[in-house]
Image (tube, helix red, strand yellow):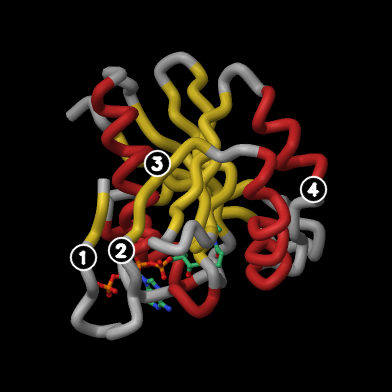
Amino acid sequence: MATRRDSRKASTPVVRLEPMNAGHIPEIMSIENASFDDAWVRDAFERELVNDFSRPHVALDNDDRVVGYVIYWVAGPEYHILNIAVRPDSRRAGVGRLLMNLVVADAIEAAAEFVALEVRPSNTPARSLYQRYGFATVGFRKSYYRDGESAEVMILNLRR
Ligand SMILES: CC(C)(COP(=O)(O)OP(=O)(O)OC[C@H]1O[C@@H](n2cnc3c(N)ncnc32)[C@H](O)[C@@H]1OP(=O)(O)O)[C@@H](O)C(=O)NCCC(=O)NCCS
């Protein structure tokens, strides 16, 4: 899967998706630390590489640089997005959409019933991305994040 240059960002490279491997982790850690105050540690990514129900993927540019990643779990009828981030200098160029397309297409192909995720109510970019796909808020997990912020639980219902 590839996306062409986005007219809004002249420097946007062609991007392709691949399963994550250990060689990607140093670049992932740099994106992760730039993206989250409560960033995952390296071990957490390494665990996902050997977790049978995890599907970790990276988005690579044409220089094989990691520009984004997504980690999702397949749990029976549920697909669950655990982590998604795009390199700060590659945002607003469609990489997030490409990663979401992968998850949703995989879930539809597997006849999953829904895709779920948690997001900070304060995270406007992420919430906007999910809303574009039709995710709806179904509840909140109180004090879910380390700093005490609650998580908004969003679901994309695939059984309409
Ligand atoms: C959320 C994130 C993954 C989006 O990635 P991205 O590559 O910039 O997203 P895209 O360019 O594909 O944008 C798709 C849509 O998302 C929404 N969106 C993305 N960034 C946005 C922003 N800063 N403000 C408002 N809406 C935004 C828009 O609807 C956008 O469509 P548009 O560009 O046509 O308006 C990225 O901002 C990121 O890595 N954030 C830090 C990590 C994070 O918060 N992850 C989510 C944890 S729940």
Task: Answer whether labels 1 and 2 touch (C-beta < 8 Å).
Answer: yes
Task: Answer whether labels 3 and 4 touch (C-beta < 8 Å).
Answer: no
Q: CA distance from mark 3 to mark 2?
A: 30 Å
Q: Nearer the viewer, residue 11 or 63?
A: 63
Badge 4 local density, few (<14 within 10 Å), some, or many (20+)? few
Q: Position of residue 17 (x, y in %)?
A: 39, 46
Residue on which disc 2 sits = 14
Residue on which disc 3 sits = 155
Q: Is residue 47 above or below residue 2?
A: above
Where, quadrant-wise, is the N terminus in this rendering?
A: top left
Q: Nearer the viewer, residue 107 or 68?
A: 68
Residue on which disc 4 sits = 42
| Comparing labels 3 and 2, the label whose residue is closer to the camera | 2
The image quadrant of residue 26 is bottom right
Ligand 1 closer than 8 Å to label 1 CB: no
Q: CA distance from mark 4 to mark 2?
A: 27 Å
Mark 3 or mark 2, earlier in chain? 2
Q: Is residue 94 above or below residue 60?
A: below
| Comparing labels 4 and 2, the label whose residue is closer to the camera | 2
Residue on which disc 1 sits = 4
Badge 3 local density, few (<14 within 10 Å), some, or many (20+)? many
Kindly identify the residue that appears in the image at 42 percent across and 61 percent down: 61
Number of labels in the image equals 4
| Comparing labels 4 and 1, the label whose residue is closer to the camera | 1
Q: Identify the mark at residue 38; answer none if there is no mark.
A: none
